[in-house]
């Protein structure tokens, strides 16, 4: 896969049938190992223009790896990929965002994490809540679980049910190692709204409910 110009056509043929995220990720990484950052960014954008959603996924994976060093790649993920209507693309966006955070360092990525969580696009917000799962297995959040809980809990009444489900599941993940922290957080919630009750039920699944 070292021939730059032939790579898109090769993937078009290779992905004529549905394959796993893992294999697509492997193809993107193999290309990245033998090409420059600029070439990878350009290729990621070119692949995203494909009519084959799996080729697009390879492009999103590639852009996620570029984003730590290329602001344009990060903005493209936030502003363009998040608007895609294919759920698989949104799953890859979440993985790509986690790659960005890992390569940047989760603590250093906090301003971008907060920025994405403030987006008006639910797919952008969900890319954070879903991409960083399990949050407290990630560096920085492992040592600072309360920071993860605060970031997630701020979206307990999110407009999107899709996002609220992700938030609830992410808090539930954290409760496995930090039940006392999640229990304390949930005790502070006003569960009179159906939106908060949805998150509350998911987050409290493995702990004693009040």
Image (cartoon, grey):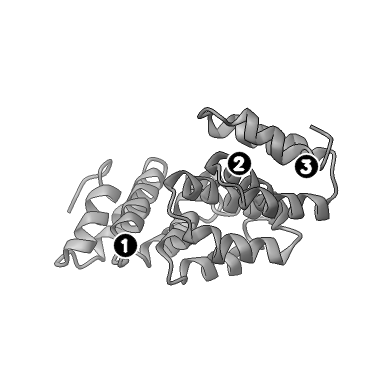
Look at mark 1 in the image and give the residue it sits on: 160
Rendering coords of residue 6 (x, y %): 78, 37
**Residue at the spot x=74%, y=54% of the render?**
41
Q: Are marks 1 and 2 in contact (CB under 8 Å)?
A: no
**Distance CA(mark 2)–CA(mark 3):** 15 Å
State left or right for residue 62 relative to residue 156. right
Q: Nearer the viewer, mark 1 or mark 2?
A: 2
Quadrant position of residue 125: bottom left
The numbered mark, 2 or 3, whose residue comes first in the sequence reads 3
- Residue 191 appears anywhere in the view: yes
Q: Given the current orientation, which residue lies at the most extreme left position?
A: 192
**Distance CA(mark 1)–CA(mark 2):** 28 Å
**Distance CA(mark 3)–CA(mark 1):** 35 Å
Look at mark 2 in the image and give the residue it sits on: 55
Look at mark 3 in the image and give the residue it sits on: 32
* Of residues 174 and 160, the one drawn nearer to the viewer in this rendering: 160
Disc 1 is placed on an element classified as: loop
- Residue 109 appears anywhere in the view: no
**Residue at the spot x=41%, y=47% of the render?**
174
The numbered mark, 3 or 1, whose residue comes first in the sequence reads 3
Rendering coords of residue 129 (x, y %): 45, 55
């Amino acid at each position: 896969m070292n021939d730059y110009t032939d790579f898109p056509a090769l993937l078009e043929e290779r992905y004529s049938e549905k394959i796993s995220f893992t294999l697509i990720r492997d193809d993107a990484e193999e290309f990245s190992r033998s090409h420059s950052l600029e070439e990878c960014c350009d290729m990621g954008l070119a692949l995203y223009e494909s009519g084959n959603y799996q080729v697009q996924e390879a492009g999103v994976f590639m852009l996620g790896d570029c984003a730590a060093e290329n602001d344009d790649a990060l903005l493209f993920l936030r502003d363009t990929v998040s608007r895609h209507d294919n759920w698989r693309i949104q799953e890859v966006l979440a993985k790509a965002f986690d790659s960005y955070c890992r390569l940047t360092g989760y603590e250093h990525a906090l301003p971008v994490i907060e920025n994405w969580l403030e987006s008006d696009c639910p797919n952008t917000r969900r890319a954070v809540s879903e991409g960083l799962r399990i949050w407290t297995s990630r560096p920085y959040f492992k040592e600072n679980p309360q920071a993860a809980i605060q970031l997630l809990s701020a979206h307990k009444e999110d407009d999107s049910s899709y996002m609220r489900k992700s938030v609830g599941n992410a808090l539930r993940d954290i409760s496995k190692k930090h039940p006392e922290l999640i229990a304390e957080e949930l005790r502070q919630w006003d569960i009179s709204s159906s939106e908060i009750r949805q998150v509350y039920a998911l987050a409290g699944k493995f702990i004693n409910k009040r």
